[in-house]
Amino acid sequence: MHSDDIVRLETTNNPQEAYLLRQALEDEGIQCRVVGDYLDAGVGDVPGIRPEVWVHRDDLERARKIVAIHERPPTVPPEANPEPDEEGGADL
């Protein structure tokens, strides 16, 4: 893997988000690297300094699909939201 074959996949809001994304990618067999995860430690909370996740160019499209899946809000199955009964409350 040559360094010029590495591309930025995503800029995250914080190191925790970057590492969660890294774990999701690695679970799918995609090697990646978090860059800039602790840059703010030396300069404080400066806007514009955010962690990035980088992947090999060949994995970029598949990695984008994984990011899209993880950015979707979770769906709640219908049985988790019971219909209200006639009196306005939910059956328990």
Image (cartoon, rainbow, N blue to C red):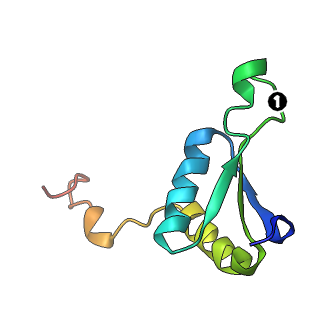
The C terminus: image quadrant: bottom left
- In the image shown, does 32 or 16 lie closer to the viewer? 32
Residue under the point 22% across and 52% down: 89
- Residue 26, given in percent of the width and then of the height, sits at 52, 66
| Residue nearer the viewer, 63 or 85 | 63
SS assignment at label 1: loop
Residue 47 point in image, percent of width and height: 82, 30
Q: Is residue 27 above or below residue 23?
A: below
**Along the horizontal axis of the image, is 17 left or right of 36?**
left
- Residue furthest out toward the front: 2
Residue 14, image quadrant: top right
Where is residue 55, by image quadrant?
bottom right
Q: Name the residue rendered at 43%, 67% in the picture.
A: 75
Q: Which residue is mark 1?
A: 47
Q: Is residue 50 left or right of residue 65?
A: right
- Residue at image point 64% right, 62% down: 32
- Residue 4 visible in this rendered orientation of the protein: yes
Residue shown at the point (32%, 71%) measured from the top left: 78
Residue 83: tell me if it is visible: no
Q: Quadrant of the N terminus?
A: bottom right
